[in-house]
Each structure stands twice: as C-alpha cells, then as structure tokens.
Amino acid sequence: MKDAPNKIPSSRICVLRYSDEVVICSNIAGLKSIGLWMQRLADSNPKEAYHFHLLWELESDECKFDGVLPKNIWFLAEAEHASKRNESPDGTTRVEQELTFQVVTEETLDELAEQQKSGLIPESWLKDDSSYEVNCK
C-alpha cells in the first residue's frame, strides 16, 4: 500500500448537506486532494477495507490543532425551515439521495466560509429543485 498522500496546503472544501443531496464544493487543490485519496483506495486491497475520512485526512494541521479559522474544510446544513423540493417531472423519479462534486471559485468558498459559525447553508444556496433519475423502459 502506498503511503498516504501529502496534504495540499491550498485545499478548501465545503460540504453542503441538503435533505436529498450532498454537494462537495471545492477549489482545484481540494479536488486534487480528494483524487489522490481516491487513487490510494483504488490501488488498495479490498480485503483490507481501507477508507478515507475527509476531515481527518484533509483538514489542515493549523485548523485541526491550532484552531485557525476559517477552516479549510467545513460542513454546512439546511435549516429546518428550508424550502421543500418540487415534484418529479413526467418520466422521472425523485432521487432520495444524490452526491455531487462541484468545482467553485475562491470567492464562492469565501462566501460559504462566512457561514462556518452558523453552520447553515446561505439562503442564496438553498435549492427548490430535487434530484431526479429518468425512468427507462
């Protein structure tokens, strides 16, 4: 098994937890970090059941041990009163859970980082659509 990948110091990752979807918003460095860990898992022996914890492996030592803020990796969730999702269009089924990876700008990560204290997804990021899959015959 290869050694664990080195941390990329400029990695920034925000995980948005919606009721029906998890969106991982990241800069390029963060996606590269995730990719290195995915490659390590892909190269591993499945019988060993290796795994990867986002916070444990990618959170900077300065954030983890010295309390530096804003964190380079953080989670935001929907408030309880977040808007409800719309109905599935014809020929589709609403998906109960989806996982999305999205590359975003540093400015977007700055906007999301401002919410670290509240822990809530900003209103401009709340969604009213659902994730769907097409019904194939």
Image: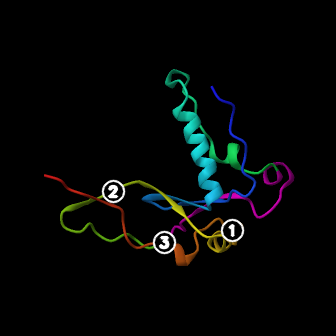
**Residue pictured at 52% horizontal, 67% vertical:** 80
In the rendered image, residue 65 lying in the magenta stretch gets the answer yes
Above or below — where is 85 with respect to 75?
below
| Residue at screen point 61% across, 43% down | 36
**Viewer-nearest of discs 1 and 2:** 1
Q: Reading the chain from its start, which is encountered first: label 1 or label 3?
A: 3
Percent x, y of residue 21: 45, 58
Which residue does the numbered mark 2 point to in the structure image?
95
Ranked by sequence position, the earlier of labels 3 and 2 is 3
In the current view of this chain or complex, which residue is farthest to the left?
137
Between marks 3 and 2, how big is the CA–CA gap?
18 Å
The disc placed on residue 113 is 1
Residue at image point 72% right, 67% down: 117
State the separation of the CA atoms marked 1 and 3: 19 Å
Tag 2: Cα neighbours inside 10 Å, few (<14), some, or many (≥20)?
A: some
Q: Which residues are magenta?
A: 62-81
- The percent coordinates of residue 41 (x first, y second) are 55, 34
Total numbered labels placed on residues in the image: 3
User: For numbered disc 3, what is the local secondary structure?
Assistant: loop
Question: What amino acid does circle 2 point to?
Answer: Val
| Residue that sits furthest to the top in the current view | 47
Question: Circle 3 is placed at which residue position?
Answer: 82
Secondary structure of the residue carrying numbered label 2: loop
